[in-house]
Image (cartoon, rainbow, N blue to C red):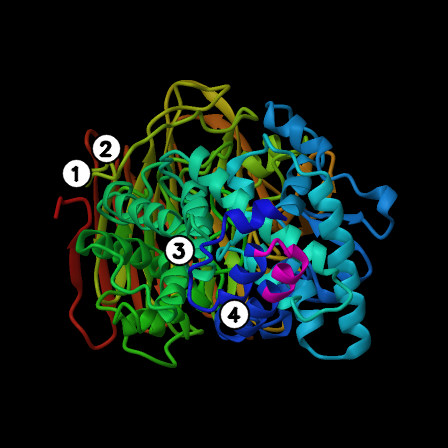
Amino acid sequence: MKALFAQLNLDHPGLEDVRAAVARDDLDAAGERLLAYYSGKRQERCLDFWDLSGPEDYTPMPWGAATTHDQLWKNTPERVLAGQLYASGHTFDFSRDADIDWCSDIRLWADGGKYPHAQARIMLRRLYWLRALDLCYLRGDPAEQSRAAAQFSRLMTSWLDQWVEEEFAVNHGIALADTISHSGLVRSWFVFLPAPQVPAGLKLRLLQHIAEGAADLLQRAAWHPWIWGLSEASGLGLMGALLPELKGAPAWRTRCFEFANRFFQTELRPDGTLKRMHFCPHYTGATAIWPLAFYPLIAKLGYKDMLEPGARLGVERMVDWIATVQKPDNTIPQITASDIQGFSRWLASGAAPFNRSDWLYVATAGREGRPPAHTSRVLPEGGAFCLRDGFTTEAMVGCFHNGDYHNLERTSLALDLYALGRTLVTAPGRYGYYTPEFLPYFAAAGYNSLMVDGSSQQIWGEHSLHQGAGLTDAAWRLEPDFDWAWGRHPTGFDAAPDVRWQRGLLFAKSEYWLVIDRVHGPGAHDFSLRWLLTPSKTVVEEDGLAVHTANADANVRLTPVLPPGSKLHVWEGNNDPWRGWYSAENGSKMPAPQLEYTWRGKLPTLTAMLIVPYRDRVPEISLAMKETAPGCHELTVTRTGGTDRLTLDLRGAGAARLVRESAGSPARFFDLSAAN
């Protein structure tokens, strides 16, 4: 216990009784008075500080992705009370002391091995489940409080006894205080201060561990321009803000603020994208939680104006990025390893401190705040077109990815389409980095993407979107009633390296999406064009190619134009081959219809898919395509009250033009391939 008091600034106001007891070497009395001091700070530093809402306060998962909040919130109070700790799709039975092993798989993972439950063990070691025990105790039922405190005492004793000193610094930083996923050893320490079931010796031992851990983290944590480094910084910052009585607190706060100011001024691209990541809503959003949650929290304790002007501007750029990809139902595009849940809570919490009521508008689907200046937006460094006609629940929102990928995924030219309160066309999500099926399906083959000769796109690397004339590179045009985006994958496919793929998206706002796929190169090949839908009931129409859904909430119809002889197979929950799976969160999957159109033919080829959202009745809208001259194609969408004609000249550099005709109005002409 002497080691703990050696780390305290006993001259701090309020610690006079503790200092006197230490001076006369009465360490038991000193410990008792120290716990009494912190009990008096519990309201300010815990109950008034942390967001203590429970799973019932979170937005339910869509499409029945979870019958409870198990997936979104990951560890329910009832589960943790029973010793069933959940992480990464696995439930670990820790109800018996003999079953607890915190360390074994972590060491294997740290040295580069890929083992089935390593990711799950790391999640457990980061203590994300502590929040559930906190809620059990704070809800006030005496029997539940007693069980929660006993479980906290048992698991914390086991955790301390098996502590691995050489473990990743990031895990320790997150365990100390993680605003990103609502865990936090410091918060739980304050919560259980009044609990008689937690021995005073354990409370003091945990406080000493926290102090030593922060000191160790400060020494080990070097500058690391990545979200985990920011987590380490937030852990140190919270230690310094919530435990200012510790001698190391000023240095911890200083390191945190230095790191944050450097990070937000040096590690973001002009469009707000993280430099180490092109398009990944999950990791970018988690990084944005630092300023949206952590910064307002420490301001409550008096630590204001810690962001330098340049860092504050960087924060706003990054949060604008999050607001751009956030969908009205509090989900984000599943592209590139993203979990489904969005960041509405954090956008709303950051609106006032940063004076950005447009973030509140996005977070509340238009119910509060003021609308952003723009609806559709292009993220050039992120490699994404985010095209929408509004921000309310009924809006149409499309994310068209045309850039680098995260980790293992090959996602260039993938789409995520939302309308009428539901994501309709999506990506496979993030099933798990340690499962053998992840690479062939969840990293490539599960997307609404193209495969050639049974192979996926080759790795691309960094490539920002640059708009040029013609159709040789990316192109876009954003108008009040329609958007146009044209993307390309600059490399080939694993089994067909000379084949090139380009994709165009015409978004007629409040009406439809038209997707054009151009494939060119030498020879004949086998093609597989895939479309993954969210969990739905599907109906194949009489022509054997068009498909519509039969959902109770919102529906979509997909009408293709394909080469002669094309066939459709609708997969759902199939294991051999892997097809028709959707992952709402890391470690879990559920069946979802995946449409696979296959054909064999010579190149070049052009296909089209008309995608129309609707509520109950299929809209009267049709698609036709004809070749008007070699290399020239006209696609006609006949809609209620008008016609859209898209012409593609694929000769040479290429050109694209659109004519929009509506009853009672003159035709309007647009050159879509001219550089803006």
Q: Which tag is nearer the camera, tag 2 or tag 1?
A: 1
Earlier in the chain: of badge 4 and badge 2, it is: 4
Q: Residues within 10 Å of mark 4 (few under 14, many from 20)?
A: few
Amino acid bearing label 2: Thr
Q: Is residue 519 visible?
A: yes
Whole-angstrom CA distance, mark 4 to mark 3, is: 14 Å
Left or right: where does residue 235 sit relative to residue 479? right
Residue at left offset 63%, top offset 69%: 55
Amino acid type, mark 4 = Asp
Task: Return the residue nearer the eye: 144 or 358.
Answer: 144
Q: Position of residue 462 (x, y in %)?
A: 32, 31
Residue 549, horizontal then vertical, whole percent: 60, 62
Query: What is the crowding at mark 2: few (fewer than 14 residues within 10 Å), some, or many (at least 20)?
Result: some
Which tag, 1 or 3, sits closer to the chain's start?
3
Along the viewing direction, whichever of 449 and 103 lies nearer the viewer: 103
**Measured Cα–Cα span from mark 2 to mark 1:** 8 Å
**Precedes in sequence: disc 4 or disc 1:** 4
Question: Is tag 3's residue or tag 2's residue first in the polypeptide sequence?
Answer: 3
**SS for tag 1?**
loop
Residue 51: image tag: 4
- Residue 583 lies within the magenta run: no
Q: Mark 2 near mark 1, Cβ–Cβ under 8 Å?
A: yes
- Which numbered circle lies on residue 472? 2
Q: CA distance from mark 4 to mark 2?
A: 50 Å
Q: Which residues are magenta?
A: 24-33
| Earlier residue among tags 4 and 3 | 4
Foreground disc of the pair 3, 2: 3
Q: CA distance from mark 3 to mark 2?
A: 40 Å
Residue 246, numbered label: none
Does 158 appear above or below 244? above
Q: Which residue is mark 3?
A: 290
